[in-house]
Amino acid sequence: MTTYPFRLGTTSYILPDAILPNVQFLASKVQDIELVLFEADDGPNNLPTPRVVEELAALAQVHGFTFTVHLPLDLRLGSRGQDGHASMVMARRVIECTRALKPWAYVLHLDGREVKESSDRARLDRWRVQSIRAIELAAKWAGGAKQLAVENLEHYPPEFLEPVLKQVPVSRCVDIGHLWLDGLDPLPYLRAALPRTRVIHLHGVANRDHKSLACVPAEKLKPVVDLLLRENFAGVLTLEVFGEEDFDSSIEALERAVREVRHEA
């Protein structure tokens, strides 16, 4: 079995089933499971019940894995800066629901769709102030800013989050697949972010992202693996795919890349 310095993980949607059967299936295969949660107003959700949380915690203790929790909505305050925005309400609900699992990190997006291409300084400054406030509120619920891992998104300028991240001591989630999707070399971004990076999302890009790593050419995957091995990255590396076939083939691609990098070292 290939060993890594990082905690290898994947999502709670490998089987077409609920969270608990997925965690039972993955318990002996990975060291971290990303709980992908959703909730619709007055509609369906997959938030675990207290009983399911107890079962998840028991499985984690027996098998020695951790959880990361992906918050359902992009975090933002209301247009006037109020903290009752649906994304904040839902974030608090999810954090309180999963707190007993002692997650490795809560992964979140910041909603900057309306300003990401704006050149209006005042508008950008207002967005940054509100984003910092949203993070500070979520950090109180999560037990500290370090527990929050802010993820880079596709179709956003790579430097977009930097002014916010300089102001709050949050962790980072580097999504390599999003950078590949935008046609960017992930190495400069990853190298700069790594000291604060708690979680890395890795997935292939074909007609869309979140595909198997088998879709990634070796000349693109191996430099990422090489950097993580050389830097002895000890956080969570999540294979952010959805389906057993993509999971299995991603494991094979990662193992092959690790073997080749170590052989060439």
Image (tube, rainbow, N blue to C red):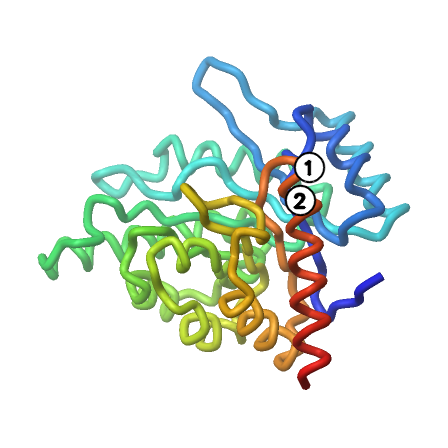
Q: Is residue 91 above or below residue 44?
A: below
Helix, strand or loop at label 1? It is helix
Residue projecting furthest to the left? 120
Q: Residue at x 45, y 46 (%)?
A: 206
Identify residue for label 1.
244
Q: Residue at x 70, y 55 (%)?
A: 252
Toward the viewer: 210 or 53?
210
Where residue 97 appears, as percent x and y from the top left, is 63, 34
Q: What kind of residue is marked 1?
A: Glu
Q: Is residue 99 above or below residue 20?
A: below
Do the residues under discs 1 and 2 have CB atoms within 8 angstroms?
yes
Count of marks overlaid on the render: 2
Helix, strand or loop at label 2? It is helix
82 left or right, relative to 118: right
Where residue 212 appears, as percent x and y from the top left, is 57, 47
Toward the viewer: 197 or 202?
202
Q: Residue at x 46, y 56 (%)?
A: 150
The Cα atoms of the two marked residues, 1 and 2, are separated by 5 Å
Residue projecting furthest to the right? 62
Identify residue for label 2.
247
